[in-house]
Amino acid sequence: MNQTIQFWRLPVVLLIGLMAAGCATQSPGHITKTESKVTGEQAVQMSPGFIGDDLRMGLVYGPSVSKDSVLVTAGVNEIATIASGQSLLIRVDETVYRFRSSTTTRVKPGDPSIENNIFADGERLSQRSFSSKNYLLPVSLLKDMVRSDTCFVQVRTTEGYVEGDFHDGGNASAKKGVREFLGTIEQ
């Protein structure tokens, strides 16, 4: 009887380990580092982490972006038209920074274009709709956001805005992922 229990323990432990490894690559704030086989250039990506309930932020750093900048994808958990002009606002302590973008992505569950979007893996799992835009931010601002006492992020839509507290915690928070992302690109 005792040997039977021992025999089943190994497959169960392996299955749990494999499931946890798969979830880690899909989890918010997960950092992925890739290297081009053609040019040898490296890119670092952070899957979108949460800023409050309805706002997420993902990051990309690599050869297509200047060395002092990061491509930020800000997304809201709804199909909404993100406003034109300065639609991303970030308040770090008492200073407000405004950013504009011209790239919008709207995706519904099952949309084939989801494969090319930074939000793809998490959205396929949650089966929710979202809208996003890309912004170019200085690396120094991300560092200030992590070090700040208060930091709020707002994305303006044509119907109003969605905002959240960058420091609002948990393992799925954008702050945790941004801190790890900065450590990765500084290596």
Image (cartoon, rainbow, N blue to C red):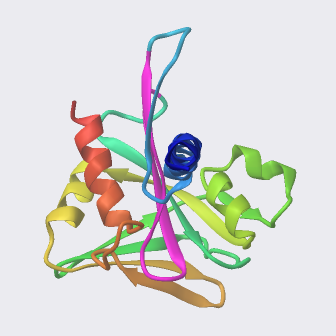
The residue sitting at 27% across, 76% down in the picture is: 167
88 left or right, relative to 116: left
**Which quadrant does the C terminus fall into?**
top left
Task: Give the residue furthest to the top.
Answer: 38
Q: How many marks?
A: 0
Residue 5 horizontal/vertical position (percent): 54, 49
104 left or right, relative to 10: right
Residue 83 falls inside the magenta stretch:
no
Task: Give the residue furthest to the front.
Answer: 1
Magenta region, main secondary structure? strand
Residue 129 horizontal/vertical position (percent): 74, 72
Give whichever of 144, 173 is nearer the camera: 173
102 left or right, relative to 93: right
Magenta part of the chain: 41-63
The answer to whether residue 73 is above or below residue 69 is below
Quarter of the image for residue 119 reads bottom right
The answer to whether residue 149 is above or below residue 102 is below
Residue 46 falls inside the magenta stretch:
yes
Quarter of the image for residue 127 reads bottom right
Residue 14 horizontal/vertical position (percent): 54, 41
The residue sitting at 52% across, 17% down in the picture is: 36
Residue 114 horizontal/vertical position (percent): 76, 52
The residue sitting at 58% across, 91% down in the picture is: 160
The residue sitting at 49% across, 31% down in the picture is: 64
